[in-house]
Image: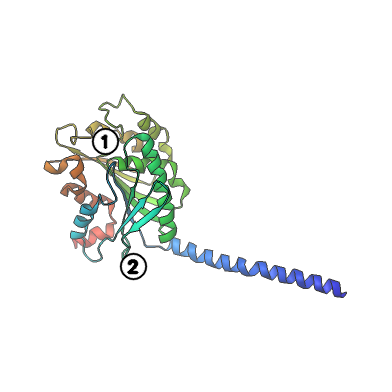
């Protein structure tokens, strides 16, 4: 074997080793990440507020949920997505909390279908960062008012990009047909949601809650508009339930802290193991 051949073989061998070391390191790191993902116990409740509301919208709801919760209380992490793409955080997730509450708010919190689509894109940006950071493999969702519309837009356009299971979703006072009081007059948004309903996970348990003060509305959203959610979710999601709450606290802005609504969140959104602890 000539000296030139030896040198060539040595260079090739060193090159192969150079490729193998980072490849091994990447594979080992990737396996660890996959293992953490599939064994993750973290199952957050991700909440989205309605138009004009901020990431502080659910402070009262979380306070009431924690009042009835034994053991580890729900952490509260607030996320804000700015118009320039920045994502900022306020709060922390405690290391021993497997069911934290994460609220995603927006600088652009205005009404209208065009803004709802923009907000769904903002949710996607925040969700991607949160999932990468906390490595959860499932979550539950809650949206108040237009927050339920943002959730629906996010589910239909972006959720399938993730290997993450949306177990349960509750929307509260969500105007699926805006201010229309007849399902015969479908808005462009409702028509789009119905057209894309096949993207909704068939394993999803969906709960829609309406408030009534005047028998047909919560003084802002018509009951018929809330009920229009059935045309999107019913017979597509595994489970779809509509519930109506009444009384003095059934006004639209009061719904997130309405005691009946808090009880429904405890019963239908939170993990069953937490409910069992409360009953025990």
* Badge 1 or badge 2: first in the primary sequence: 2
Q: Quadrant of the C terminus?
A: bottom left
Outermost residue to the left? 248
Q: How is the image coloured?
A: rainbow
**Residue at image point 32% right, 39% down:** 110
Disc 2 target residue? 95
Coordinates of residue 130 in the picture (x, y in percent): 40, 56
In the picture, the disc for residue 205 is: none
Relative to residue 178, is residue 92 depicted above or below?
Answer: below
**Residue at image point 24% right, 31% down:** 224
Coordinates of residue 222 in the picture (x, y in percent): 22, 32
Disc 1 target residue? 226
Q: Secondary structure at mark 2?
A: loop
Disc 1 and disc 2: Cα gap in Å?
Answer: 37 Å
Relative to residue 177, is residue 82 depicted above or below?
Answer: below
Few, some or many C-alpha atoms within 10 Å of disc 2 (few <14, some 14-19, many ≥20)?
few
Asked if residue 255 shows in the view, the reply is yes
**Closer to us: mark 1 or mark 2?**
2
**Residue at image point 32% right, 67% down:** 96
Q: Quadrant of the N terminus?
A: bottom right
Left or right: where 90 falls relative to 64: right
Coordinates of residue 242 in the picture (x, y in percent): 25, 39
**Residue at image point 36% right, 41% down:** 152
Left or right: where 254 falls relative to 196: left
């Amino acid at each position: 074997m000539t000296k030139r051949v030896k040198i060539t073989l040595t260079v090739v061998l060193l090159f192969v080793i150079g490729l193998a070391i980072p490849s091994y390191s990447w594979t080992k790191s990737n396996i660890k990440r996959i293992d953490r993902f599939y064994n993750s116990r973290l199952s957050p409740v991700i909440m989205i507020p309605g138009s004009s509301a901020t990431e502080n919208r659910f402070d009262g709801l979380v306070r009431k949920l924690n009042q009835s919760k034994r053991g580890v209380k729900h952490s509260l992490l607030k996320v804000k997505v700015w118009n320039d793409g920045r994502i900022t955080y306020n709060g922390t997730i405690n290391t021993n909390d497997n069911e934290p509450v994460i609220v995603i708010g927006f600088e652009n919190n205005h009404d209208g279908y065009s803004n709802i689509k923009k907000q769904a894109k903002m949710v996607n940006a925040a969700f991607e960062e949160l999932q990468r950071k906390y490595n959860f493999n499932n979550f539950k969702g809650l949206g108040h008012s237009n927050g339920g519309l943002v959730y629906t837009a996010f589910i239909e356009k972006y959720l399938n990009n993730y290997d993450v299971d949306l177990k349960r979703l509750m929307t509260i006072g969500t105007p699926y047909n805006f201010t229309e009081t007849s399902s015969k007059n479908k808005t462009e948004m409702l028509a789009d949601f119905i057209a894309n309903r096949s993207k909704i996970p068939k394993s999803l348990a969906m709960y829609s809650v309406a408030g009534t003060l005047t028998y047909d509305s919560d003084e802002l959203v018509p009951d018929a508009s809330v009920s229009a959610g059935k045309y999107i979710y019913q017979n597509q999601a595994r489970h779809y339930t509509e519930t109506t709450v009444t009384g003095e606290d059934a006004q639209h802005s009061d719904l997130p802290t309405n005691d009946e609504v808090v009880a429904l969140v405890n019963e239908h959104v939170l993990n069953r193991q937490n409910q069992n602890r409360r009953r025990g």
